[in-house]
Amino acid sequence: MADNNKKKPINSVMFNADGSPAAPPEPQIEEMTEEDRKYLISQGLNPDDYIAVKEGTEGSLINNPDETFNPDEWQEVDPQSIERELGFTERQRYSGLTKIEDKENALKKDFDNVTRVGESNFVMTDPKTGELIVYNKEGYIPSGGDLADFIPDAVGSVVSIPTTIIGGALGSAVAPGPGTVAGGIAGGAAGYSAGAEAARRGLNWLNGVEDTRTAGETASQIGTDLGYAAAGGALGAGAGAALKGGAKVIGNSLKSRALGGTVDDAAKAAERLATYETAGVTPTPGMIGGEALSTAELQRAGTRPWLKTKIDEVPEQLKNNWLKSVDEVSGGQGAMTPNEAGGFIRENIDTLKTNVQNETNRLYDNVSGLTKGVPVESSTTRKAYETLAHEFENAGAFKKSTDGSVYERSLGQVKALLDDIEGGKADFEYLKQARTTLNDTGSAMGATRAEKRIYSRVGEAITADMEATAKKAGDDVLKAWQDANAQFMRRLDPTDVIGNKAIDKILKNQSDDAILKLVSTGSKTNASQATRVLEQVHMAGGDDALRAVSTTVLDNLGKNAAGEWSLAALGKNWTVMTPEAKSSLFKFKGGKEIYERMNGIVKAGQQFQEYGNNANRSNTARHIGSAVKGMMDRYAGPVAGAAALSGSPSAAVGYGAFRGAKWMFDRATRKMIEDPKTLSWLAKLPSATDPEKHLLGLKNLYQTTKDERTRLTIREYLESLENDNK
């Protein structure tokens, strides 16, 4: 075996044109370049353990009898092109190691030129023969080496479930039934993970390999418990016989079927799965597979309590996730009663009204200060006075009888203002106050049509003179005036969020309960008003105030008329609200993410309701018949190049028909349903163009995942394919 600490050349062997090795010249040592040092470091190697040799002069080092070197080590090698795979007897030595680094270190003790390939594979050379070996040769049929990796899972599973282990291939030699020595490893019913961990520790101890996850821990009694000696003999010779049978594999037509029946649409199935996952819920296959599959599943739930429990858990999970999100919105403060929330909204809008008035006054006060000593303009106001006087003088008898008093009163007020301006008694502030008084008259509740029209014209005229006065004072003053006037005009706009009418409509015309109801519905008929109210609350009290109101609204959306939580009520109430109204509930920091999550919960709830509707369909029998037919379809074909347990491709390994639904529903549905990773894989199976290649992805997941539950689920799934030859 090679000493891996000896100095090694970093260049390739050179060959003659006929392929024979070139005569070894004297080695010429060179200084290692910085690029070479960095490369070695990137490969996890210490540059100080290597020497740089001039290309073409390294032959004598390679032929040194103290050094074993394989030229293939330095070449790009496709693991699939290597004929020899590490078999069961060899590979079980490393099956207790889960960290890739630990496995690599252990292999280096037994083989030369160990090179990691990808995330979980290795290429190495036999120290005795120089033959290339691949740790794991990928294939959809498990080889003996794959079965060796199953050992910890086999022991772990026997602790928690009374099923056949490794489909009879490993048999009782490695995994005796419950109550025997293997079952006692983890203390009886301690659970799968404990059993598997005990198995790993025992294997590592027996094989003398180091598991850095549990450094210093040993399990001297576990070797006998595992039946290790029996495994070494029985598995090598007897496992092949256990797997003999008719060869059946996955056919190409499988791509249109999965999850126990015909999936109505592969894209829709994937979309349904994504919706449930966004909502934080793990669905059953029927919930994502479509009508026929859901019907069959719901019927099966009547005789399988565990499946019914799993189905019933989904709406409860949706409810809990919704309420958790509501609590996140509230910051843990909880929801208010409708009356309390309405009163809270009223208080905040009243605060907004005060704030808007104060801000308007501040802006105008600023202009007043900047225009001190500047004579006010009055030309536009005087022209308006003259126009009104002319209209009144030429009005008919009927018009004077209906609008005469308005003309007379307004003309008198404007004449008085003009007299004050001419007398030097008016400044910019005086004009502002006069405009406010006259505008209030025209916009007051109950104002006549004539009052609205006449006083609006007067107000516009005074506004023009105020602007002209500011302009005379300079550009900076004009800009200050424009800011103040823009604020004032917003207050006059009935549709503006800070408009007097928009604010007063809530403060004067709505009860507290009615205010919350307005915000909670947010339907097309009142969406703009509901959105405006939420914006007003946000402007007045910031994120905290909006969160408080939104919490109560969101909490109530999930309640029916009786005040009880209802998934149906949530879907209906959420749908009634316009996107704009819903969006307004979440316009606080971090709100967008919460909105997307809660929207996902509602969508998942609606999908679940559609799924539940299949339980009461009048044509249930037809759906079930179709689903069962899909379940029982078999796909057959020859197995080419099947690998035997010994690692040799000469033996044949039989695979049963892939009956997704039959196996899932009758044998392992529970685990597949409860494991998100395997469920996600199943959801993608209908659209797989190459099902066999898709199965390799599942095998790769088994080799790389650290999740013990997932490993067990995948292992049993693969075993079902292997043994289902009925």
Image: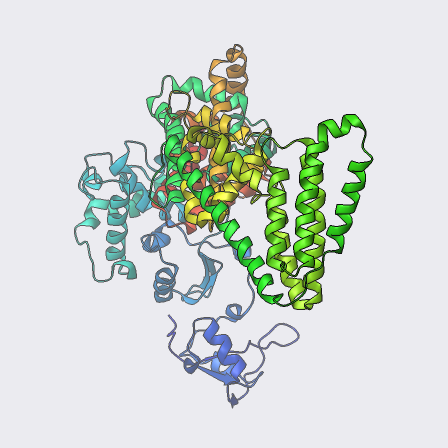
Q: Quadrant of residue 204?
A: bottom left
Q: In this view, does 610 lie to the left or right of 19?
A: left
Query: Can the viewer see residue 331 in this picture?
Result: yes
What residue lies at 28% left-to-right and 51% top-to-bottom? 200
Q: Nearer the viewer, residue 298 or 52?
A: 298
Work out which residue is located at the far top of the displayed protein and give it.
Answer: 618
Residue 517 sits above or below residue 135 on the image = above
Residue 355 sits above or below residue 162 on the image = below
What residue lies at 39% left-to-right and 38% top-to-bottom? 713
Q: In which quarter of the image is residue 308?
A: top left
Q: Is residue 328 left or right of residue 431?
A: left
Q: Which of 327 and 683 is in front in this view?
A: 327
Q: Where is residue 326 in the image (x, y as percent from the top left)?
A: 40, 39
Q: Where is residue 491 in the image (x, y as percent from the top left)?
A: 59, 45
Query: Can the viewer see residue 591 in this picture?
Result: no
Q: Nearer the viewer, residue 67 or 340?
A: 340
Q: How many numbered discs, if any? A: 0
Q: Where is residue 453 in the image (x, y as percent from the top left)?
A: 71, 37
Residue 239 sits above or below residue 576 on the image = below
Colour pattern of the rendering: rainbow
Q: Nearer the viewer, residue 100 or 261?
A: 261
What residue lies at 51% left-to-right and 75% top-to-bottom? 39
Q: Where is residue 692 in the image (x, y as percent from the top left)?
A: 55, 40
Work out which residue is located at the far right of the displayed protein and give it.
Answer: 394
What residue lies at 77% left-to-right and 25% top-to-bottom? 398
Which quarter of the figure is the N terminus placed in?
bottom left
